[in-house]
Amino acid sequence: MTDEEKRELFSSLIHKISPVTPVTPVTHLVKGPVKRPEDDPNKALQIVCELLKEEVPHYDWVGFYLTDPNAERELVLGPFSGAPTEHVRIPFGHGICGQAAERKQTFIVPDVAAETNYLSCSPHVKSEIVLPILKAGEVMGELDIDSHTIDAFSEEDRAFLLKVCYAVSRLLYRVQEARKS
Ligand code: SME
């Protein structure tokens, strides 16, 4: 997919994602017992994962990891779309996800086979992008995307996914608050 094709696809896709992540809580807008997916932050994040996976040909696994509010420097798997993964918990520093959390930096890995600190979910995965989502300077969670295509992620992906992370940050916060024990 060329960067021009990506730009077109991403610009239409952000318009599909925005209604799922409204700025104003839907409960303030809707009178009566009407429930929409946005009322349930887990469900809204799930819809975002499915939209990304279904609409972007080179996104083959899309998921959110959350910083576990009940554990020390550990990520826990949240909503995702794609094959189930054994990596449900990832300590900071481990794999691409753990490194992105530790360094608070986006990681783009064009060829996962060339990485030593990498946690494999499937032999089909060839490249990966992980974007940390911060609140008050701390990592609240991450958006993790795997591709079966080598070198699938460009600056177009990074710019688009940064917007997605911004849009979902409040949902992620609500999910994390609900998990606090
Ligand atoms: N590959 C990741 C693990 C998560 S799976 O991609 C779903 C990593 O190295 O951290």
Image: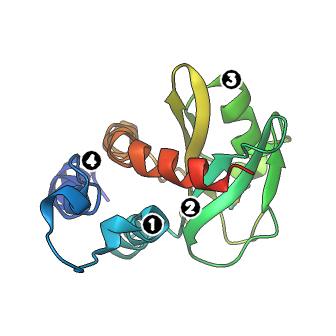
Residue at image position (27%, 75%) is 36
The first of marks 3 and 2 along the sequence is: 2
How packed mark 4 is, by other alpha carbons closer than 10 Å (few <14, some 14-19, many 20 or more), is: few
Residue 11 visible, this angle: yes
How packed mark 2 is, by other alpha carbons closer than 10 Å (few <14, some 14-19, many 20 or more), is: many
In depth, the one of 126 and 81 nearer the eye is: 81
Q: Is residue 156 shown left or right of residue 110?
A: left
Q: Is residue 140 shown left or right of residue 119?
A: left
Mark 4, secondary structure of its residue: helix
In depth, the one of 24 and 17 nearer the eye is: 24
The first of marks 2 and 1 along the sequence is: 1
The label on residue 63 is 2
Q: Which residue is mark 3?
A: 103
The first of marks 1 and 4 along the sequence is: 4
Task: Tell me the amino acid under the disc marked 3.
Answer: Arg
Across and down, in percent, residue 13 comes to: 22, 61
Task: Tell me the amino acid under the disc marked 1.
Answer: Cys
In depth, the one of 124 and 136 nearer the eye is: 136
How packed mark 1 is, by other alpha carbons closer than 10 Å (few <14, some 14-19, many 20 or more), is: many
State yes or no: discs 2 and 1 in contact (Cβ < 8 Å). yes
Q: Which residue is mark 4?
A: 3
Mark 1, secondary structure of its residue: helix
